[in-house]
Image (cartoon, rainbow, N blue to C red):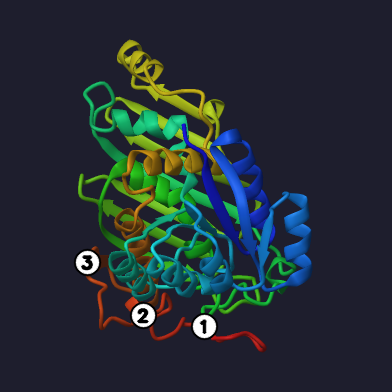
């Protein structure tokens, strides 16, 4: 296998996490360059991870480096502009979530990808664990049967101190609350298992945090298959958990974890009388690979080596981002929203809060 050169843009907390995940890939990866506008953080990150070349400006990096992969680890409001610059220069980009603040921004990224010849992928790491791959293989197969209903909960706790970071909790800089910035990982996994969604009805509230964005959303999502799922995204939950449950005709499949899962976090409960066939189907799965960034990095490098689009592509990302926009649109207009309904001309295409959230903006917070 060839060795790939990687550059990281941004040196905040997630960049160190990703540098560690890259290191886990051994000789497949060289971290060759890093960029950040903060000279102290740039120097500290470069020393900690032995990065040979360090830049205070993205354009300087693009003008002097030819990495195989650029990983964007910057705050959300910078993603569109930085991704477009990298793609226009022909680079492959892997971007932290959310990839953009709106569907309009994601469309700009897609246009730059097409025009510049680069590739864009989003970090949705839960798709890549062995358990998820096993379930995808079995969805709709005779031994589990059709998916009928599902539960997808991201129940986390983020206190007021968390939102002391200036860009958090603001539509202009974070793009949304837990629907866009936290629960998106878990319901992206749900979508990767159950396929295209058809319609959604939702509520969103700001219950307790001094933010412009929501701190709670609840949605009922109907899929093309006919399956129906409830999706809850909360930043108010003292007992934190990320929980996914799919009830098939012949078995219940459950996953409970917090920020990443392994084989032991999955369980399967057969319908009485189907124990043997369900157990045999699950035993034929793809164990041994936990979810996480290292698993997605490996899949991205495999794609680059094979000359195929790296996952998760813009097309796949758009399905998830459209559900995010539809949850906000349904919640803020008190109406069901169908897939394909939010397009250019819709306020929810341009901004996740559309014409504005139905609550007052806290003093000192951007709208």
User: Looking at the image, which residue is at 62% across and 57% down?
Assistant: 33
Q: Which residue appears farthest toward the front when viewing the image?
A: 64
Q: Is residue 308 left or right of residue 53?
A: left
Which one is earlier in the sequence, the residue at label 3 or at label 1?
A: 3
Q: Nearer the viewer, residue 238 or 197?
A: 197
**Closer to the observer: label 1 or label 2?**
2
As drawn, 359 above or below 89: below
**Rendered image: mark on residue 359:** 1
Which residue has dot 3 on it? Answer: 340
Q: CA distance from mark 2 to mark 3?
A: 15 Å
User: Looking at the image, which residue is at 39% across and 21% down?
Assistant: 285
Q: CA distance from mark 1 to mark 2?
A: 19 Å
Which one is earlier in the sequence, the residue at label 1 or at label 2?
A: 2
Q: Nearer the viewer, residue 177 or 316?
A: 316
Circles 1, 2 touching at the beta carbon (< 8 Å):
no
Q: Position of residue 153 (x, y in %)?
A: 49, 49
**Closer to the observer: label 2 or label 3?**
2
Label 3, residues with CA under 10 Å away: few <14, some 14-19, many ≥20: few
**Rendered image: mark on residue 236:** none
Whether residue 60 can be seen here: yes
As drawn, 43 above or below 32: below
Q: Position of residue 142 (x, y in %)?
A: 21, 23
Q: Is residue 68 left or right of residue 227?
A: right
Q: Position of residue 290 (x, y in %)?
A: 53, 32
User: Looking at the image, which residue is at 37% across and 37% down?
Assistant: 246
Which residue has dot 2 on it? Answer: 350
Q: Quadrant of the C terminus?
A: bottom right
């Amino acid at each position: 296998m060839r060795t790939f050169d990687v550059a990281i843009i941004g040196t905040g907390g997630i960049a160190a996490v990703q540098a560690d995940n890259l290191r886990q890939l051994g000789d497949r990866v060289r971290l060759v360059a890093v960029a950040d506008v903060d000279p102290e953080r740039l120097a500290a990150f470069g020393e900690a991870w032995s990065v040979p070349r360090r830049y205070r400006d993205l354009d300087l990096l693009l003008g002097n480096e030819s990495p195989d992969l650029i990983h964007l680890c910057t705050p959300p409001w910078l993603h569109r502009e930085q991704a477009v610059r990298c793609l226009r220069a022909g680079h492959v980009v892997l971007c932290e979530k959310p990839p953009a603040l709106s569907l309009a921004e994601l469309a700009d990224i897609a246009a730059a990808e097409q025009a510049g010849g680069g590739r864009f992928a989003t970090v949705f790491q839960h798709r890549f664990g062995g358990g998820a791959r096993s379930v995808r293989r079995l969805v709709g197969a005779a031994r589990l049967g059709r998916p009928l209903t599902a539960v997808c909960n991201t129940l986390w706790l983020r206190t007021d101190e968390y939102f002391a970071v200036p860009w958090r909790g603001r539509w202009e800089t974070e793009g949304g609350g837990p629907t866009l910035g936290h629960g998106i990982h878990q319901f992206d996994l749900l979508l990767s298992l159950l396929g295209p969604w058809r319609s959604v009805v939702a509520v969103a509230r700001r219950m307790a945090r001094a933010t412009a964005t929501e701190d709670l959303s609840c949605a009922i999502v109907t899929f093309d298959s006919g399956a129906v799922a409830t999706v809850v995204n909360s930043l108010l939950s003292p007992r934190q958990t990320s929980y996914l449950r799919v009830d098939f005709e012949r078995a219940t499949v459950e996953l409970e974890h917090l920020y990443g899962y392994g084989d032991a976090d999955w369980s399967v409960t057969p319908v009485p009388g189907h124990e043997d066939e369900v157990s045999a189907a699950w035993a034929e799965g793809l164990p041994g690979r936990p979810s996480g960034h290292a698993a997605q990095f490996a899949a991205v490098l495999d794609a680059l080596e094979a000359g195929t689009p790296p996952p998760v592509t813009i097309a796949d990302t758009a399905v998830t981002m459209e559900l995010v926009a539809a949850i906000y649109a349904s919640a803020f207009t008190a109406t069901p929203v169908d897939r394909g309904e939010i397009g250019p001309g819709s306020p929810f295409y341009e901004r996740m809060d559309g014409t504005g959230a139905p609550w007052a903006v806290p003093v000192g917070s951007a709208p």
